[in-house]
Amino acid sequence: MNTRVASAGPLEGVLVADFSRVLAGPLSTMWMADLGATVIKVEHPERGDDTRHWGPPWTQTSSSYFTAANRSKSSVTLDFGNDEDLEVARELARRADVIVENFKAGGLARYGLDHATVAKANPGVVYASITGFGSDGGAQVPGYDFVVQAVGGLMSVTGDPEGEPTKVGVALVDVLTAKDTTIAVLAALRARERDGLGQHVEVNLLSTLLGSLANQASGYLTTGRSPGRMGNEHPSIAPYETLRCRSGLLAVACGNDGQFVKLCDLLGIPEVASDPRFETNGARVENRRAMVVLLEEQLVAEDAEEWERRCVDAGVPAGRVGTLEDGFRLAESYGLNPVSTLPAPHPPQVAHPVRYSGTEIRPAAPPPELGEQSAVVRAWLEGDTSVSDLEERLGGASV
């Protein structure tokens, strides 16, 4: 049974045609759904989104991977090789305020679903294309998060300095690309309010990664030298790393000299903070090894959990290295409400991460089953009614 709830969010009335799959595109459109947009996810009738088949873990209806990026959407199945289905897709594109797609550059042109063709009939459309390497020289190169982490340099700065370059523990480039896509779409919608015209926004994984490397990228551009792996150390701040305790690791992040003084006082070694080798951040970075020895000599007296408590009380930014379970428990203890509960048999969802003082967020609805809302969407497209009418129809739809 469908459990969609109408939304009065900031994107209420915005129709999003989601022609994307896997993670970057679907995650972006899911956030738009959180903000009130009506998101129609277009899937192949037989396969659906690739991530429906990416497991374990599995849910009772799909995979946890698919669940992570597709809540509060409606699924319509269309085969672009079928003339009738293709016309449905084109009609959806003609009505959409936003289109998000991640086909290879130019891949939708043969179906008449590329930006140039769609914009002729729908000049107000905000059309977001997500690729691995852009629409020019890298247009035909397949773009996967893992590959982009490798060729874009992220792996070169991740991992133990004596080990191999290492990927991040989540498809971080896809996630960051989803955020860039959302920003781009919202900016283009705001521009449309001003001039009445939509536009084509292009987002690619490589540019997103380079833009997200922040100080590491800036350091390379400043010096001409590529940074290397430093494990959990920071190239420009110390102590800003994990330190060994009696049991467990403590992540310490002293961002200024005052915090380092507090840490040394807490550890009972105030003289270290006034030692010329450690008195300033630059000196601590230069003498990091000697500093770590002195700090860890004190930290081995207690477990990481106890040091975390003491550091927090003393105003020293620090925390023990925990698990995802620990992370959710911590967020709950701080009143952040990190989980949205869905009706059985669906597992809980990570909640929308932002709080708004005056904006309503759509209550999370379960990710759709393949083609769950096909009949409703097709019937709506045959008429000439508003997006609010579609929302009302979807609210009463069932599998």
Image: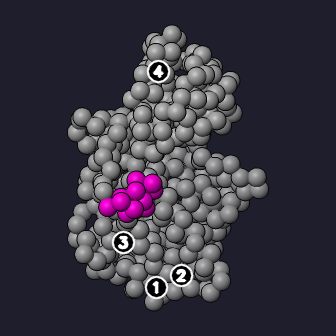
Q: In the structure shown, which secondary structural element does the residue marked by tag 3 occupy? A: helix
Q: CA distance from mark 3 to mark 1?
A: 20 Å
Quadrant of the image containing the N terminus: top right
Q: In the structure shown, which secondary structural element does the residue marked by tag 4 occupy? A: helix
Q: CA distance from mark 1 to mark 4?
A: 65 Å
Q: Is label 3 or label 1 in front?
A: 1
Q: Are marks 1 and 2 in contact (CB under 8 Å)?
A: yes
For residue 332, say whether it is visible: no
Residue 46 in the image: x percent, y percent? 29, 56
Residue at 25% x, 56% y is 151
Disc with the residue nearer the chain's start (3 vs 4): 3
Residue assigned mark 2:
198
Task: Inspect the magenta stretch and tell me whether residue 15 lies in it.
Answer: no
Q: Residues within 10 Å of mark 1 (few under 14, many from 20)?
A: many
Q: In the structure shown, which secondary structural element does the residue marked by tag 2 occupy? A: loop
Q: Is label 4 or label 2 in front?
A: 4
| Along the line of sight, the residue nearer the viewer: 137 or 265 | 265
Question: Is 334 on the left-hand or right-hand side of 85?
Answer: right
Q: Is label 2 or label 3 in front?
A: 2
Residue assigned mark 4:
294
Residue 133 in the image: x percent, y percent? 30, 67
Q: Residues within 10 Å of mark 2 (few under 14, many from 20)?
A: many
Disc number placed over residue 119 in the picture, else none: 1
For residue 117, say whether it is visible: yes
Q: Are marks 4 and 2 in contact (CB under 8 Å)?
A: no
State which quadrant residue 330 falls in.
top right
Q: Is label 1 or label 4 in front?
A: 4
Instruction: Give the amino acid type for the residue marked by disc 2 in the picture.
Output: Gly
| Along the line of sight, the residue nearer the viewer: 395 or 318 | 318
**Segment colored magenta:** 210-224
